[in-house]
Amino acid sequence: MGSAFYPFQLLRLLILVIAVAKIAHDPHALNWLAMGLAAGISYQAGTCIWQKLNGAFQTSGTMGHQNLLGLMAHFVTMPLLAMLLGGNRSRVLMLGVASSLVVVALGASRGAMGFSLMESRFCSYCR
């Protein structure tokens, strides 16, 4: 039964790729996309802080597991860092990167921490 849903998953991925390709050439749309990423990770950071203050050892935000949250933080941090390195010095983007670091630190996921360290090394080589 699960294999019957594979074509639907491929169709969903195709629709996502077409939507991203359509907005990728418009700089205003990229700014709105980055602001959405920053807003989402900021919300997750707030949720993680709330969970940590209520006694959670490894916070998972609204994702259900800290590894999923770490993966999401990784996929948010890379485009925001790329836009910052590209010259867009928006405070919203900086807030998004800082929120991503808070999420990774409070989530205490080893994989997320490793990816964040690799990203920071990559950014130090790009300067």
Image (cartoon, rainbow, N blue to C red):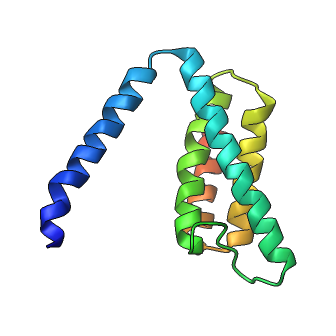
Quadrant location, the N terminus: bottom left
Taking the image as shown, residue 115 lies to the left or right of residue 39, namely left
Instruction: Work out which residue is located at the far right of the displayed protein and give it.
Output: 53
Please tell me in which quadrant of the rendered image residue 89 appears: top right
Taking the image as shown, residue 6 lies to the left or right of residue 97, namely left
Q: Position of residue 106 (x, y in %)?
A: 74, 70
Please tell me in which quadrant of the rendered image residue 35 appears: top right
Quadrant location, the C terminus: top right
Q: Nearer the viewer, residue 42 or 109?
A: 42
Residue 21 seen by the camera: yes
Residue at the image position 74 percent from the left and 50 percent from the top: 42
Residue 126 seen by the camera: no
Taking the image as shown, residue 24 lies to the left or right of residue 61, namely left
Taking the image as shown, residue 55 lies to the left or right of residue 44, namely right
Residue at the image position 73 percent from the left and 53 percent from the top: 43
Q: Nearer the viewer, residue 80 or 26?
A: 26
Q: Nearer the viewer, residue 120 or 4?
A: 4
Q: Position of residue 97 (x, y in %)?
A: 71, 45
Above or below, 89 against 98 in this view is: above
Above or below, 43 against 20 in this view is: below
Please tell me in which quadrant of the rendered image residue 113 appears: bottom right
Residue at the image position 59 percent from the left and 16 percent from the top: 28
Q: Position of residue 75 (x, y in %)?
A: 53, 49
Q: Position of residue 40 (x, y in %)?
A: 65, 48
